[in-house]
Image (cartoon, rainbow, N blue to C red):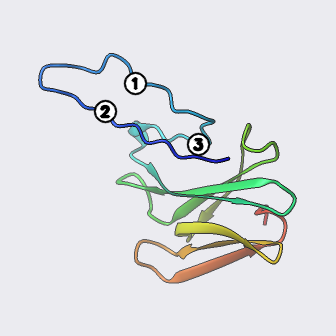
Amino acid sequence: MLSLTLISLAVTAGSAIASVPKPPGVVIDHSPVSSRQYIGSPSIAVLPDGEYVASHDLFGPGSTIDSTVVFASKDKGKHWQRRAELKGQWWSTLFVHHNALYLFGVTKEYGACVIRRSTDGGKT
């Protein structure tokens, strides 16, 4: 079962947060603040063979606003490997149809619609 946990923190004037809790589950990817690239548009799909595929785009002042990164897990999300970084793919969603993996989004912010299809789990 996949779940999304939202953590909200409140800071009052003159106080500081002593510690921030570690997020639950497994972190698939991280983008350091110094890169000025932020992770957005998360998506996940389960292939017919049980392999998990996840994706996200990169946005922010340090990004090109046209890239999506794809990851795969063969052990139900315990470990993830980067599968591809796609230029000209953004604001995208993964889905499976007739045993093929699709990535549907746009080429860039407010760009043309793009749909990619893979029959090998996103390797190509």
The residue under the point 73% across, 37% down is 78
In the rendering, at what x and y percent does residue 94 appear?
64, 66
Residue 55 sits above or below residue 13 on the image = below
- Disc 2 or 3, which lies upstream in sequence? 2
Q: Nearer the viewer, residue 20 or 111?
A: 20
Quick check: marks 2 and 1 in contact, CB under 8 Å? yes
Quadrant in the picture for residue 56: bottom right
Element assignment for label 1: loop
- Disc 2 or 1, which lies upstream in sequence? 2
In the rendering, at what x and y percent does residue 83 appear?
73, 53
Three-letter amino acid code at the position of disc 1: Val
Q: Nearer the viewer, mark 2 or mark 3?
A: 2
Q: Which residue lies most toward the bottom here?
A: 112
Three-letter amino acid code at the position of disc 3: Asp
Quadrant in the picture for residue 68: bottom right
In the rendering, at what x and y percent does residue 113 appear?
53, 82
Residue indicated by mark 2: 9
- Disc 3 or 1, which lies upstream in sequence? 1
Residue indicated by mark 3: 29
Residue indicated by mark 1: 20
> Residue 92 got which mark?
none
